[in-house]
Image: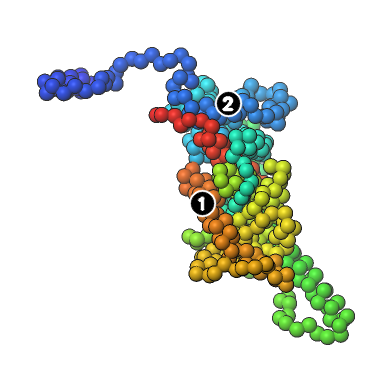
Amino acid sequence: MINHYLYQKTTDIHLLGEEMGKIYRFYDPEQILLFPPNIREWLPEGHLAFFIDTLINHADLSTITNYYEQSDRGNPPYDPRMMTKILTYAYCIGMPSSRKINKALYEDVAFRVLAAGNFPDFRTISDFRKIHLKALEALFAHVLNLCSEAGLVKLGTVAIDGVKIKANASIDRNYNHKKLTEKEEQLQKTIHELFEKAEQTDAEEDRIYGKDRRGDELPDGFRTKTEQLERIRKAKTILEQRQQEKKNKYDRKKYERTETEKKTGKRLRGRKLKHVDEKPEESAVANTTDPDSRIMKTRTGYVQAYNGQLAVDAKSQVIVATDLVQDQNDKQQLQPMMQKIQENTGRLPQRATLDAGYDNEEQIKPFWDKVDLYIPTQKDWKQRKAMKGTLPPKGRIPKKLSLRERMKRKLLTKKGKAIYKKRGSSVEPVNGQIKDSRGFDRLSLRGLQKGKSEWKFICTTHNILKLWRHTTPMPSY
């Protein structure tokens, strides 16, 4: 009755439109349509999905396929090429959630084209990512080579920067050694009680476990509790290792100081070494959700995070090297990043710009004569203030200047100012494109090694988008 009423009202509206003399484009939601038999015709020419389809077809996925070919158990798995394509496309458009990817396979045309009638559930997608994300790191080199062939990797100027990427963990889950010990003891007691309860109810297992269970499964909640206990123990171990490193450093310095005093026969002046105990300090904390992550300071406050490293070709904004580290600052990252650039491209850049966080003479020295480096000795806003209204130095650089003084002088020259000024339009936009445009401000996986793989995959998809926009005319939707 309601449907008939609504149909009559719709007809009246159409008739009203005709009486008014206005002609509208044809619209009939009830019209039966015959879609093209080729699903690829549903998307416009030059769509990102077609580009990814071709790219993955020509990529070496032997590491992933070998994983399945070595096992003949269970049902036939989904084609690894298809799974890689939908995962790559999902990350390109900023959709890392396996549940959202599964939903898009039913509702999004591009996903349906790439999946070609396959609908893996979210757990299958999630497991594929966890198992093969390390293998997918090889895609970075493949895509970077394609970018190089397309003329996007010049290495005239490379900008290196660190960006804080939130871990898949809450900052509220940080505890000191004493609290972790208490939690460990409490969980051990809970697990023991679960086992005791299971033993006491063995005689009534039919009633307790039900007909579809054997009765010898782990007690309810046991697996969750043991996983929590494992993470707590790992967090405790990390605190103990950090403290041991501090203790070793203290012992080494104390020994060197003592030996120097013996040789000179004089007590060294200056501040005395602060004694370090073997027991972790009360202020030292570790996270029980992702023990590998660290508390890091950002412009908006403190977050539980990792430090993502990026080396970007300044002209094309293609990422030529990447890494994920636990260090809260960038003091030790110049040398590793330069080595990764050389490994990935086969050569070092002509010049490189870095912010004041990389100002470390030990890291700079090996590359001083190989790369034209531009690194301020103070924070950017202080550097700009120092440069403002300063006359550029003239003449040869005095030989007596230290490496840092030479760097400071170089940045005050007209050439130095011009080169460093371009840094703001090279690596900073890449940070924005990854974190703001595509929404990758947080990792989906936990642990340093899985985080490294996911971060590299995020950077790979960034380069895919750069290559697609460079080589493919933008589709008209």
Q: Residue furthest right?
A: 263
The spot of residue 80 in percent (x, y) is 62, 27
Quarter of the image for residue 253 reads bottom right
Quarter of the image for residue 344 reads top right
Seen at 68% across and 67% down, the residue is 397
**Nearer the observer, 129 or 416:** 416
- What secondary structure is marked by label 2? helix
The spot of residue 8 in percent (x, y) is 17, 19
Q: Residue furthest left?
A: 19
| Badge 1 or badge 2: first in the primary sequence | 2
- What secondary structure is marked by label 1? helix
Callout 2, which amino acid?
Thr
As drawn, is 28 to the left or to the right of 197? left
Q: Answer whether residue 219 is visible to the viewer in this image.
A: no
Q: Residue furthest front?
A: 395
**Nearer the observer, 276 or 434:** 434
Quarter of the image where the N terminus is located? top left
Say which residue label 2 marks. Answer: 54
Q: Are marks 1 and 2 in contact (CB under 8 Å)?
A: no
Seen at 70% across and 64% down, the residue is 361
Seen at 70% across and 48% down, the residue is 348
Say which residue label 1 marks. Answer: 425
Callout 1, which amino acid?
Ser
For discs 1 and 2, the disc positioned in front in the rendered view: 1
Q: Is residue 281 above or below residue 70?
A: below
Quarter of the image for residue 30 reads top left
As drawn, is 94 to the left or to the right of 215? left
